[in-house]
Image (spheres, helix red, strand yellow):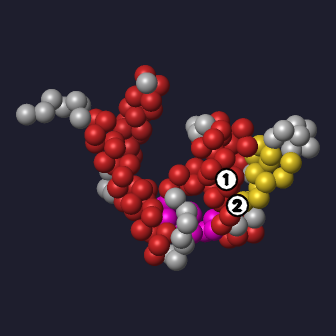
Amino acid sequence: MTIPGTDIANIIAKLRNKINNFIISRLADEGITGLAPSHGAIFLVLYHDGPQPMLALSDKINRDKSTMTVLIRKLEALGYVKREPDAVDKRSSIIHLTEKGFKFRATFEQISNELIDRIWGDTLPKERSRLDQELKRMIERL
């Protein structure tokens, strides 16, 4: 018999895998190839906050500089974003969405909403809030 809570890391890992598989499957259903679930955080920030310096974007999505560079290069190669030199800090780049990146927003939001609906199902708002708070506290403790 497993003591409740002792397999939380395993449960979260399984949930993450299921989420990633759902996203990849839905992207494929939409005929979109090349994107990975990890690109979603970049789109979210750029849709919400607009163009960002690479460092600010990296901080907002909690990725190190080398990982961020790989993710942005892939999005550039696929035509979703472009880099422009930062006028203030010549060592930095500003990441902008391209027209293709802006057009992807409707699909991004549709898949995101479907995912949220799948995850929560008929869970009551009070239960959603409680789980959300508990997960955030776990993150803080780590």
Between residue 112 and residue 20, name the one nearer to us. Answer: 20
Which kind of residue does numbered mark 1 sit on?
A: Ile
Between residue 12 and residue 67, name the one nearer to us. Answer: 67
At label 1, counting other C-alpha atoms closer than 10 Å, the crowd grade (few under 14, some 14-19, many 20 or more) is some
For image coordinates 13% across by 33% down, the residue present is: 2
Rendered location of residue 79, percent (x, y) = 70, 67
Q: Mark 2 highlights which residue?
A: 76
The residue most toward the top is: 141
Specify the principal SS of the magenta part. Answer: helix
Q: Would residue 38 appear left or right of 22 to someone viewing this image?
A: right
Query: Quick one: SS at disc 2?
Result: helix
Quadrant of the rendering where the C terminus is positioned: top left
For image coordinates 46% across by 75% down, the residue present is: 29
Check the image and report above or below for 142 versus 50. Answer: above
Q: In this picture, which residue range is highlighted in magenta?
A: 104-113
**Does residue 66 show up?**
yes
Q: Would residue 40 appear left or right of 82 to someone viewing this image?
A: left
Check the image and report above or below for 24 versus 59. Answer: below
Which kind of residue does numbered mark 2 sit on?
A: Glu
Rendered location of residue 85, percent (x, y) = 86, 48
For image coordinates 76% across by 51% down, the residue present is: 95
Check the image and report above or below for 115 versus 123. Answer: below
For image coordinates 63% across by 41% down, the residue present is: 66
1 and 2 marks in contact (CB < 8 Å): yes
- Asked if residue 138 lies in the magenta stretch, the reply is no
Quadrant of the rendering where the N terminus is positioned: top left
- Asked if residue 109 lies in the magenta stretch, the reply is yes
Q: Mark 1 highlights which residue?
A: 72
